[in-house]
Image (tube, helix red, strand yellow):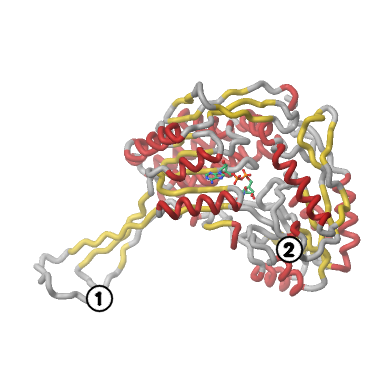
Amino acid sequence: MSAQQQDQYEYGNFIADEEIKPASRRFTSYNPTTGKVWGSFADSTASEVGQAVDAAHAAFKGPWGALSPTRRGRLLMAWGAKIAAEADRIAALETGQNGKLFAEMRAQLRVAEDWLVYFGGLADKVEGSVIPLDRTSVLNYTLREPYGVIAIIVPWNSPTFLTVMGVAPALAAGNTVVIKPSEVTSASAIELARLAVEVGIPPGVVNVVTGLREAGEALVGHPKVRKINFTGGDRGGRAIASAAGQRLISSVLELGGKSPNIVFADADLDRAEAGVLAGIFAAAGQTCVAGSRAYIQRPVYEEMVERLRRRAAAIRIGDPMDAETQMGPIATQAQLAKDEAMVKKAVAEGAEILHGGERLRLDPFPEGYFFSPTIIHRLSPANSLLREEVFGPVLAVIPFDDEEEVIAAANGTDFGLASGVWTRDLRRAHVMARRIEAGTVWINTYRAMAFNSPFGGYKDSGIGRQNGQEAIYQYLQTKSVWVELSDEVQDPFVIRAGR
Ligand code: NAD
């Protein structure tokens, strides 16, 4: 199906086991490829958000809490298989809303199963411990217990993938969730919740409330929400951390980036070229790990920049449903305007456009939100493009001379999400891995991710980790149980020191 043939959709909230279509407040969603209306969603009020939280709380206190971890895990695995089986249908909905390549959205839906199988498998491997106290008459052990209702708030760029990255460990740990998807891409979360009930996950375990920022705020502020998983921009992250702080609850924050992709002169330049291109243009730059700053060592700078320019000029831009397309549109008009404005600002600050830098009016999508793959060069170290996240297909290229210089430049932003290093020198690769301030360092690869490898940000790119074993412990709290085994009556006024 091409982007032009899509129907208009109408969705409601998914609470417990039904989709509730409110007659009152709704908001409109647009297809970025055509610029036309895609459908509409519930613009949830605080009271509708409350209904979802109540359903999640009831499921936590009821059927979900009563299930053994093994049974919970099996249900998550079954859900994963179901999502993978429906990948084509749901991916088309996502592409219709965010304009990202259908092939990428489908791959993310398929791979979501791996996350649910991994965390489903971890559900019955969470163990407490017995602590050998000095006070030998006491048996002291720990229990790992879920928090209750977890809020999952996600952005639009990888809707299912990022939702499942939060939901899988939260549910495996025994919590229930209320998901507030991005207002740009709300459909797939509702489809996922429906499939959860279909595979036998008890109603109320997975709920979805759609809406604008206010719906997210109502969710974060709800007294029965005990923890937050937020993926989005640093501005939203700060607001959520503050709101959570006021309520004395904690949050896992996965925020933005300004990731450096560093090419040394000794690198395999063919592979480096492919890695730099994939890092910034593969998802039209709309990925938190976009390698938006390419630092290239001076002896190969001219050659690499020319290679990148040639490849950028040849990118096939168009309908994201078409398997031949390499880059689709920008997800929203607001993001398109931001891309344009940030390029203009960089130029006003003295940089030059090497390629692109403008909105494209494509036939047959003149109203689509297309932006050309853009390469900017000759930036002064103070240029805003080296510090601020664009979240679009805009690459800054910067020459460097040596390791010390590039380490200082790479670390010269408030962000610290990801980074890439291209070199054949083993010593240098590991030194760079140690000295770059980022949660992920890719050596001779880029944009790779796995369910069992921790992912998260240093500095302003976030707090906490997704993926890997430590992710599940973020959704568990530790209880220390003390059992006095001696039947001796203790003198209430004798202070018992540790020893
Ligand atoms: P956003 O921060 O505008 O919105 C994300 C979600 O949060 C949406 O559902 C939105 O409605 C909600 N929201 C925003 N402010 C809120 C508030 N104060 N209280 C409650 N909810 C609120 O982000 P976006 O524009 O949708 O996505 C792009 C951003 O996400 C980029 O900065 C990108 O780097 C980041 N991102 C990070 C990761 C990661 O894993 N680190 C992954 C993908 C995207």
Question: In the rendering, which numbered label is found on residue 498?
Answer: 1
Q: Quadrant of the C terminus?
A: bottom left
Q: Residue at x 70, y 45 (%)?
A: 286
Relative horizontal placement of residue 345, taking residue 86 as reference (left or right): right
Q: Amino acid at mark 1?
A: Gly
Relative horizontal placement of residue 337, taking residue 174 as reference (left or right): right
Q: Amino acid at mark 2?
A: Val
Question: In the rendering, which numbered label is found on residue 421?
Answer: 2
Label 1, ligand 1: CB separation under 8 Å: no
Q: Residue at x 49, y 43 (%)?
A: 217
Q: Quadrant of the N terminus?
A: top right
Question: In the rendering, which numbered label is found on residue 256?
Answer: none
Q: Secondary structure at mark 2?
A: strand
Q: Secondary structure at mark 1?
A: loop
- Of pointers 1 and 2, the one earlier in the residue sequence: 2
Classify 10 Å Cα crowding around label 1: few (below 14), some (14-19), many (20 and above): few
Closer to the camera, 57 or 23? Answer: 23
Q: CA distance from mark 1 to mark 2?
A: 51 Å
Q: Position of residue 324 (x, y in %)?
A: 80, 35
